[in-house]
Image (spheres, rainbow, N blue to C red):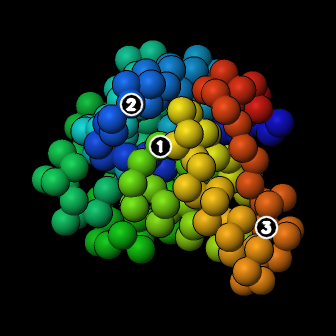
Amino acid sequence: MTTARSVAVFCGASLGRDPAWAEAARALGTGLAARGHTLVYGGGKVGLMGEVANAAAAAGGRVVGVIPEFLRRAEHAHTGIAVLEVTQSMHTRKQRMFDLADVFVSFAGGLGTLDETFEILTWRQLGMHEKPIVVCDIAGSGQALMGAIEAAIEMGFAKAELREMVTIVRSVSDLLDWLG
């Protein structure tokens, strides 16, 4: 368990095939707001990103979106949130989200979600930060990520300590309890 003030959530710009992911994203947004956490996310109003942001904002939470200029149209930059920061690149987006967050949550999503999660995990592995990283494995959405980590360890490309740098939770309620 941790006491976080600001929670970065990496999640999809699509809803995915399982309705459980959208339902969980809404529960996460509502739960973060109810507990007084700031949501930091990718700045879009579509997909799971939009669901978590809309739910947090509707529940009175503070929502900070960080979106690169070139994605403002593709991900429909969210204008109904407290703060929308526009960056020049994906790299500066990730750095800004890192700067704003106390904790990182990897939620259901595609390659962008995996990229953001692996980058923040790599930074931790390299000793660049000690911030917690949580994989919220809703309906199996975190299995591919954890499988890649396990494969890297088993093949000798990563140390077993990498497992200790990631906390896995199986539900939004477990995640919210862990966040405090």
Q: Is residue 46 visible?
A: yes
Image quarter of the N terminus: top right
Tell me the CA gap for discs 3 and 2. Answer: 29 Å
Of mark 3 and mark 2, the one earlier in the sequence is: 2
- Residue of label 1: 108
Numbered circle sitting on residue 118: none
Work out whether 109 lies above or below 149: above
Quadrant hosting residue 139:
top right
- Name the residue tied to disc 3: 162
- Residues at discs 1 and 2 in contact (Cβ within 8 Å): yes
Q: Secondary structure at mark 1?
A: loop
Q: Nearer the viewer, mark 3 or mark 2?
A: 2
First along the sequence among labels 1 and 2: 2
Marking on residue 18? 2
Query: What amino acid is found at the position of numbered circle 3 in the picture?
Result: Leu
Position in image of residue 4 (x %, y %): 71, 39
Callout 3: helix, strand or loop? helix
